[in-house]
């Protein structure tokens, strides 16, 4: 299976340091997580939303690949009422609990941006994370129509 992440080429795409330093929807500060998507288009949508349609320089698409037999978890949103809120309390508690239990290296979560998309959290500290490899790092071609008003 493959996962996609739009990331800054100047930083290690396998560290999770950005999320560790600042926290994000599914993790509190201090906990390293690599955020990715199950589709390339989903990764582009996430980047567009989180940057206010102003794409920072140095962006690349990192494609991760892992074997089909690698176990992963899926977040059941009905058990986490309020996960979509901007306050982030519920979603961070859910992600932090997954990191703490450490049963799997990957957690699939719903995308706030587009309901049918799934985001994937990768725990770089999990023993199975060594089975997830960077397949490619490639430049992105953004269509100018995405940025016209």
Image (cartoon, rainbow, N blue to C red):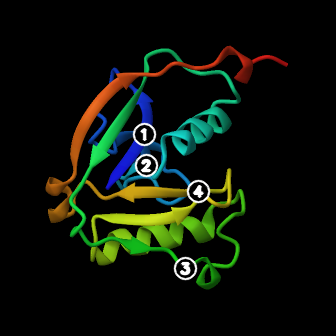
Q: CA distance from mark 2 to mark 3?
A: 18 Å
- Verify CB contact (< 8 Å) between mark 1 and mark 2: yes
Q: CA distance from mark 1 to mark 3?
A: 23 Å
Task: Report helix, strand or loop for mark 1.
Answer: strand
Q: Nearer the viewer, mark 4 or mark 1?
A: 4
> Relative to 55, is 117 above or below?
below
Q: CA distance from mark 4 to mark 2?
A: 13 Å
How many residues crowd mark 4 within 10 Å: few (<14), some (14–19), many (20+)? some
Q: Sequence-wise, which precedes: disc 4 or disc 1?
A: 1
How many residues crowd mark 1 within 10 Å: few (<14), some (14–19), many (20+)? many
Mark 4, residue position: 117
Q: Quadrant of the C terminus?
A: top right
* Most foreground residue, 32 or 40: 40
Mark 1, residue position: 5
x and y percentages locating residue 34 in the rendered image: 37, 48
Mark 2, residue position: 35
> Relative to 9, is 25 above or below?
below
Task: Report helix, strand or loop for mark 2.
Answer: strand
């Amino acid at each position: 299976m493959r996962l996609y992440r739009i990331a800054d080429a100047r930083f290690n795409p396998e560290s999770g340091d950005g999320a560790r330093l600042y926290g994000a929807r599914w993790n509190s500060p201090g906990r390293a997580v690599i955020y990715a998507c199950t589709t390339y288009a989903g990764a582009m949508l996430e980047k567009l939303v989180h940057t206010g349609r102003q794409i920072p320089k140095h962006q690349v698409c990192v494609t991760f690949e892992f074997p089909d037999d690698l176990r992963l978890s899926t977040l059941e949103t009905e058990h986490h009422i309020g996960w979509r809120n901007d306050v982030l309390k519920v979603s961070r508690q859910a992600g932090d609990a997954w990191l703490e239990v450490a049963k799997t290296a990957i957690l699939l979560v719903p995308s706030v941006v587009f309901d049918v998309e799934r985001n994937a959290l990768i725990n770089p500290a999990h023993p199975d994370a060594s089975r997830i490899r960077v397949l490619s790092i490639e430049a992105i071609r953004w269509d100018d129509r995405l940025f016209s008003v």
